[in-house]
């Protein structure tokens, strides 16, 4: 462990020491988007028709500058997503494990978050959000090279930009919570050093490519006619170019992390005593507190993904409220019907399932569509953590796949259904005509969504399996049986969450 930390620190010091201060002209960074005409945005003024030659050339339109209100909102949204991770996710997971492993989970979430933030600044942002090829960006913005307080990032509205620094910070929080979600699948049995190395590898080779494939494009201002749209599409991420809709991370975050967690639960193996000894959550009070923080923070996660403060932001906000509430109710109703009683754990899990399922859809569907998605998510994810979990035979400690995998897949597919204007959705925005495309095929869009889901599953599964095997060869994945029985709080960190 000491050697790993020393190596990490030395590597970061060498990287930072080589950072150049050379300034270069900056262009608006690409904001995440969901299809070639995807993100709903306030209609911009139509492009002017070609005019007759004038005696003197007209002055070029001034470059857009960030609006203080949009900037302030994005700062708040970024802080809310940080709250989701630490302490929200940490407490939610911490309450679900046994008391002897409480601090180990808190430590893993806290340190993985810190590590991903650093890696994001060093190379992650550049790899995800620069123009490279359909699968990954370039290292043109390595160490944030060329980004200044005056640099701007595109949004989903023509002529509307935000400071690139806050866009990069917002996206950093997404990367961090995605990596942290994985640790719930193999909680209570993996070495701390192995968790860090795996998350660094998986972030580099799974999160960054998927984020680029789904969210990278040149921004709406680059689209003025059919020819420019074709160029933007050719330069965009592979799934963006296909037309996949993912407003806030159903594929990039939830399915991506859930598959990595499921693979990990198989590769690492089951906990000692699994199926024979009681492994009940030790503190559901903390789990409820964590779930509540997740719900509050998720408004920044979903509504913030619009990158500005307008009507679509409000739509994502109300959908996050409605779908989560409906999923809570449907989960505990399912519990009451199948087990005879509704539980606090069920209510908290139901809320998270609704949050997961509405994530890809929140800016595309209407409130009634959100309620249907929430209803389905609560019931299907309840089956995901019970019936499906038994079928899979894996020890997914904190049901990462049952909630985030099942909910993410459901939400991604139903986005294609309820984004239809005929069902109250926004449809697909056409940046050539600056209006919603009147033609929308539910079957066609669901097929595109399915392609995005399958791509994410396969990519994450392959990368995860290789990364786990590499970590096992280099460091070893599991703690010893003695350390596992003692609990990771004492054996890995030398401290206890509770003093008797």
Image (cartoon, helix red, strand yellow):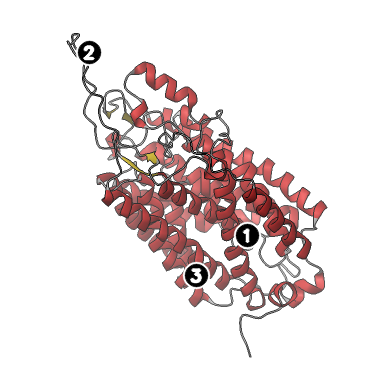
Residue 241: where, in percent of width, then height? 47, 27
For image coordinates 58% across by 73% down, the residue present is 281
Q: Quadrant of the N terminus?
A: bottom right
Residue behind mark 3: 345
Q: Nearer the viewer, residue 254 or 413?
A: 254
Residue behind mark 1: 183
Q: Secondary structure at mark 1?
A: loop
> Quadrant location of residue 7?
bottom right
Q: Quadrant of the C terminus?
A: bottom right
Res. 394 visible in picture: no
Residue behind mark 2: 50
Binning the other alpha carbons within 10 Å of mark 2 as few (below 14), some (14 to 19) or many (20 upward) gives: few
Residue 248: where, in percent of width, then height? 43, 46
For image coordinates 76% across by 68% down, the residue present is 272
Binning the other alpha carbons within 10 Å of mark 1 as few (below 14), some (14 to 19) or many (20 upward) gives: many
Relative placement, left or right, of 273 versus 378 is right
Q: Nearer the viewer, residue 209 or 416?
A: 209
> Quadrant location of residue 361?
top left
Q: Secondary structure at mark 2?
A: loop
For image coordinates 48% across by 77% down, the residue present is 285
View extreme (bottom): residue? 500
N-terminal of the pair, mark 3 or mark 1, is: 1
Q: Nearer the viewer, mark 3 or mark 2?
A: 2
Q: Nearer the viewer, residue 242 or 113?
A: 113
């Amino acid at each position: 462990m000491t050697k790993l930390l020393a190596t990490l620190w030395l590597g970061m010091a060498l990287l930072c020491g080589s950072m150049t201060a050379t300034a270069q002209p900056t262009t608006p960074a690409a904001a995440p988007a969901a299809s070639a005409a995807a993100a709903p945005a306030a209609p911009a003024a139509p492009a002017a028709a070609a005019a007759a030659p004038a005696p003197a050339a007209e002055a070029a339109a001034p470059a857009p500058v960030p609006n203080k209100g949009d900037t302030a909102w994005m700062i708040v949204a970024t802080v809310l997503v940080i709250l989701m991770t630490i302490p929200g996710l940490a407490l939610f997971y911490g309450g679900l494990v046994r008391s002897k492993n409480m601090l180990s989970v808190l430590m893993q979430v806290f340190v993985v978050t810190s590590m991903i933030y650093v890696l994001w600044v060093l190379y992650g942002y550049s790899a995800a959000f620069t123009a490279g090829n359909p699968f990954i960006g370039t290292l043109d913005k390595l160490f944030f090279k060329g980004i200044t307080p005056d640099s701007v990032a595109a949004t989903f509205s023509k002529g509307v930009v935000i400071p690139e620094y806050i866009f990069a910070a917002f996206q950093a929080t997404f990367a961090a919570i995605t990596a942290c979600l994985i640790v719930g699948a193999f909680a209570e049995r993996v070495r701390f050093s192995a968790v860090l190395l795996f998350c660094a590898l998986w972030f580099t080779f799974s999160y960054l490519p998927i984020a680029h494939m789904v969210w990278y494009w040149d921004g709406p201002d680059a689209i003025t006619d059919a020819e420019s749209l074709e160029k933007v599409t050719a330069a965009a991420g592979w799934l963006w170019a296909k037309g996949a809709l993912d407003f806030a991370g159903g594929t990039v975050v939830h399915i991506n992390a859930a598959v990595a967690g499921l693979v990990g639960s198989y590769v690492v193996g089951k906990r000692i005593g699994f199926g024979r000894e009681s492994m009940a959550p030790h503190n559901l009070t903390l789990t409820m507190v964590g779930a509540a923080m997740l719900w509050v923070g998720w408004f920044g996660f979903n509504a913030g993904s619009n990158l500005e403060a307008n009507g679509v932001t409000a739509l994502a906000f109300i959908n996050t409220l409605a779908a989560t509430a409906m999923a809570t109710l449907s989960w505990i109703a399912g519990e009451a019907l199948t087990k005879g009683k509704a539980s606090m754990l069920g209510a908290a899990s139901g809320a998270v399932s609704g949050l997961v399922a509405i994530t890809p859809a929140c800016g595309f569907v209407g409130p009634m569509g959100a309620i249907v998605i929430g209803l389905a998510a609560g019931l299907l994810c309840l089956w995901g953590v019970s019936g499906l979990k038994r079928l899979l035979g894996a020890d997914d400690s904190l049901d990462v796949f049952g909630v985030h995998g099942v909910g993410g897949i459901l939400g991604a597919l139903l986005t294609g259904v309820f984004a239809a204007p005929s069902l109250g959705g926004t449809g697909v925005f056409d940046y050539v005509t600056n209006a919603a495309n009147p033609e929308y095929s539910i079957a066609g869009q669901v097929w595109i969504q399915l392609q995005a889901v399958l791509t994410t599953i396969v990519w994450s599964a392959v990368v995860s399996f290789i990364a786990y095997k590499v970590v096992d060869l280099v460091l070893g994945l599991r703690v010893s049986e003695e350390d596992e029985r003692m609990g990771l709080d004492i054996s890995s960190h030398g401290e206890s969450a509770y003093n008797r």
